[in-house]
Image: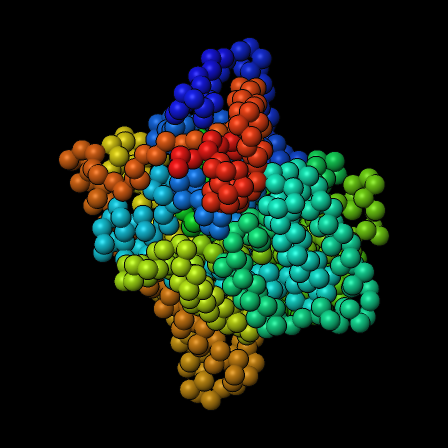
């Protein structure tokens, strides 16, 4: 292996390490073995049919494919397009202010980014998509993330980092022109409101009337604040030490939640209604978005990541040990009709819309151009954080799918059919399932009641939203692992999983609200430049109040929707999310062409074309379909006509007020569908026009920020290489000789460190920086 050390100042240690590894027989054998494992897994999942398909093959196919994609395809994109510059300072280093711009240890940034992007989508989408069988969802989750989702996240993060951490909307304005940028920004803001609101509906469905979950989740807030203060003031830079303490406190919070649930007085205190939880979530979102990032957002997301990754890895290991048999067929009749109980619509396009974040998510582009580029220490870390973080989320989606397809089909359909279909009772659910020929299964009320009792719930019928189904699936697998408690532990593992899912989703709410604040500030800056000043607190507060009020109103609509909220809102969520991905990929496509690399424009171009085909087909059907189960306007007209005729019920909806709510909600959803599709089409057309012009005239001027040399070093991967450890040692020795404080205080601003070190500045955990010139 050859190693090149990069310097920006000969009087300082290196600021970068370029390593060129050579292929050895051992490495070749390793990668051939990984490819073989993945290939065998794919053969078993995609081609072998039988009564005893093992769930372990899904793990083999997914993990092998991810490793190959990260090592080869992501590296190819890095070589041909992104080309990280070890000498260039990142926005976090240039604009360090201790609040939003803070160079942060790559492990914490990976944790924050993964926690922020991995919300409800990879949990809910695959669970709902399981109604069509295991094969379509598995193919899209794994292959889709490799060629689409991870590509988008990585490239948006890279281009935003090169543009001083600008938001996606501002990049669209800068690169596509004022008109295209205005349209894109407006579309992004509207879509963002829907995305956060639906995430809120999912978390509220999981926590409503669950004292255990509410208490445990509430305790993560003071734990995160303690971790932020601990890493900033008490033990600067001690990331591992802080992590151990945080994990111990998190486990204690989970156990204590069980104590609270068992105490009638305390249980009553934390037994909250959906409306109360909605208002609580809005209050939390406001404070999470305006407080300095080191206080709550970064440490909480980092803490959540341990919980998220640890639980998913635990589930994967449990699947390998227990080796459960898949219960769902490869493809079900619901793949070719619109009669699915979890959501309406056929395989194309609605499977791809429903899975959403597990393979491709526009929301991720907002995080990749929002909080993450303002924390990144080095450009070389973008591949790990952007591409690697999305692969990890896809693995979460696969595990969620496996948990669902290993459940008894009767239990799965009983949990995911809306209450109007089942009546909310075990008897009603059994009758609904047994009378539906497409479900190809039979169950009894006694079996459904016993399943609820096994997990300590009064009923599992119509526990829609995907989260309860995943909890049931995880409990089904984990209680069978030797030493994990057996049948008596089903209740613990179920509530543990519910808490895990709520924690999973809540981290997306807080990060999403902060990103929405950035976006609204950027957009308002076009009319009132003061809003672009990141240090203007009034602007930050106003922007946050506006965005929280917007998504909060949709959230309240969702939790009181007579048709079940998630069942009607999630399709709009999926379409909006994928439309947002189209905007992000269109901007990336234009940028690749503008910087003179049009020969590689197929990298974002292929997923852009597929995404447009899916989203426009889905939008067309939701707008123009005459089937009330599928089309928003068809459903709107049906209920409106029924009210005009004096009817007091329609289908499963009882009462005039409930019918009026359906009319109102479908009007909003149908209108938004038209607006979203129209805005996205305009942005894509403008991006194509800019791309064609750049191809004809050659590379065009972009808004890439001016080069600023870095005085910071940090490893590129999660684990530092030998050469990187040597450079870290040189920086530690340099700081010791010059009497500087040890590097590693997360979130400490240059000004604070300059005062403490008499001119030296610290730039984040795990990084090493020289004193800035006065």
Image location of residue 555, percent across then percent down: 51, 68
Image location of residue 365, percent across then percent down: 42, 47
> Can residue 631 be seen in this snapshot?
no
Outermost bottom residue: 646
Q: Is residue 569 left or right of residue 681?
A: right
Which residue is more in the foreground, 165 or 58?
A: 165
Outermost top residue: 25
Q: Is residue 365 left or right of residue 482?
A: left
Q: Residue at x 71, y 68 (%)?
A: 270
Which residue is more in the foreground, 391 or 247?
A: 247
Q: Taking 590 as reference, is 198 above or below it?
A: below
Quadrant of the rendering where the C terminus is positioned: top left
Q: Residue at x 40, y 54 (%)?
A: 534
Q: Taking 186 as reference, is 79 above or below it?
A: above
Q: Taking 54 as reference, is 561 above or below it?
A: below
Q: Residue at x 78, y 57 (%)?
A: 256
Outermost left residue: 697
> Can residue 289 be seen in this snapshot?
yes
Which residue is more in the foreground, 692 or 712?
A: 712
Q: Taking 683 as reference, is 754 above or below it?
A: above
**How does the figure colour the protein chain or chains?**
rainbow
Q: Is residue 256 left or right of residue 394?
A: right
Image location of residue 759, percent across then percent down: 47, 37
Q: Residue at x 49, y 86 (%)?
A: 647
């Amino acid at each position: 292996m050859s190693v090149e050390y990069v310097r920006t100042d000969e009087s300082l240690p290196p600021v970068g390490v370029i390593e060129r590894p050579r292929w050895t027989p051992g490495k070749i054998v390793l990668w051939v073995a990984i490819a073989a494992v993945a290939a065998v897994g794919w053969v078993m999942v995609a081609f072998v049919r039988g009564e005893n398909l093992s769930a372990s093959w899904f793990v083999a196919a997914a993990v092998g494919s991810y490793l190959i994609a990260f090592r080869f395809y992501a590296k190819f994109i890095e070589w041909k397009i992104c080309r990280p510059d070890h000498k260039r300072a990142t926005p976090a280093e240039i604009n360090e202010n201790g609040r939003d711009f803070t160079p942060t240890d790559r492990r914490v940034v990976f944790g924050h980014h993964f926690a922020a992007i991995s919300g409800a989508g990879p949990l809910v989408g695959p669970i709902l998509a399981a109604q069509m069988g295991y094969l379509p969802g598995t193919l899209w989750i794994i292959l889709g993330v490799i060629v689409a989702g991870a590509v988008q996240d990585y490239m948006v993060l890279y281009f935003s980092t090169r543009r001083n951490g600008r938001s996606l909307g501002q990049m669209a304005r800068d690169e596509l022109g004022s008109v295209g940028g205005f349209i894109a920004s407006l579309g992004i803001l509207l879509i963002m409101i829907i995305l956060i609101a639906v995430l809120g509906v999912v978390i509220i469905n999981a926590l409503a009337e669950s004292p255990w979950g509410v208490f445990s989740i509430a305790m993560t807030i003071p734990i995160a604040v303690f971790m932020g203060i601990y890493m900033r003031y008490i033990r600067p830079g001690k990331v591992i030490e802080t992590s151990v303490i945080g994990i111990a406190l998190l486990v204690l919070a989970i156990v204590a939640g069980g104590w609270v649930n068992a105490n009638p007085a305390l249980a009553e205190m934390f037994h909250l209604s959906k409306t109360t939880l909605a208002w609580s979530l809005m209050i939390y979102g406001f404070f999470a978005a305006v407080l300095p990032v080191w206080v709550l957002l970064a440490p909480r997301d980092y803490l959540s990541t341990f919980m998220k990754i640890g639980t998913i890895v635990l589930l994967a290991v449990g699947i390998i040990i227990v080796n459960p048999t898949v219960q769902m067929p490869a493809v079900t009749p619901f793949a070719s009709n619109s009669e699915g109980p979890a959501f309406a619509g056929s395989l194309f396009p609605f499977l791809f819309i429903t899975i959403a974040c597990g393979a491709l998510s526009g929301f991720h582009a907002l995080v990749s151009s929002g909080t993450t580029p303002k924390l990144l220490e080095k450009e070389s870390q973008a591949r790990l954080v952007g591409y690697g973080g999305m692969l990890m989320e896809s693995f979460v989606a696969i595990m969620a799918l496996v948990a669902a397809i290993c459940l008894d089909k009767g239990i799965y359909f009983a949990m995911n059919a809306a209450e109007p279909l089942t009546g909310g009772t075990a008897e009603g659910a059994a009758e609904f399932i047994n009378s539906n020929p497409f479900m190809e299964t039979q169950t009894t009320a006694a079996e459904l009641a016993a399943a609820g009792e096994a997990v300590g719930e009064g009923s599992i019928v119509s526990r829609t939203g995907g989260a309860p189904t995943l909890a049931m699936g995880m409990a089904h697998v984990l209680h069978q692992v030797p030493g994990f408690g057996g049948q008596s532990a089903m209740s613990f593992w179920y509530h543990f999983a519910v808490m895990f899912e709520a924690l999973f989703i809540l981290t997306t709410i807080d990060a999403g609200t902060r990103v929405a604040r950035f976006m609204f500030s950027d957009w308002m800056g076009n009319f009132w430049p003061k809003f672009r000043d990141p240090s203007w607190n009034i602007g930050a507060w106003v922007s946050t109040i506006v965005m929280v009020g917007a998504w909060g109103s949709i959230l309240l609509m969702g939790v009181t929707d007579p048709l079940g909220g998630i069942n009607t809102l999630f399709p709009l969520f999926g379409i909006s999310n994928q439309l947002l991905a189209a905007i992000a990929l269109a901007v990336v496509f234009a940028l690749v062409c503008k910087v003179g690399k049009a020969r590689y424009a197929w990298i974002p171009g292929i997923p852009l074309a597929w995404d447009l085909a899916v989203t426009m087909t889905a939008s067309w059907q939701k707008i123009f379909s005459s089937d009330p189960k599928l089309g928003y306007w068809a459903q709107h007209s049906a209920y409106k006509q029924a009210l005009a005729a004096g009817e007091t019920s329609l289908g499963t909806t009882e009462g005039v007020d409930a019918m009026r709510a359906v009319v109102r909600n479908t009007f909003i959803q149908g209108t938004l569908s038209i607006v979203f599709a129209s805005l996205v089409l305009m942005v894509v057309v403008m991006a194509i026009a800019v791309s064609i012009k750049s191809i004809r005239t050659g590379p065009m001027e972009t808004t890439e920020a001016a080069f600023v040399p870095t005085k910071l070093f940090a490893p590129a991967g999660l684990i530092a290489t030998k050469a990187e450890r040597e450079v870290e040692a040189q920086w530690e020795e340099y700081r010791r000789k010059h009497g500087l404080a040890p590097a590693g205080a997360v979130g400490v601003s240059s000004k604070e460190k300059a005062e403490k070190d008499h001119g030296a500045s610290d730039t984040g955990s795990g990084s090493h920086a020289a004193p800035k010139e006065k």
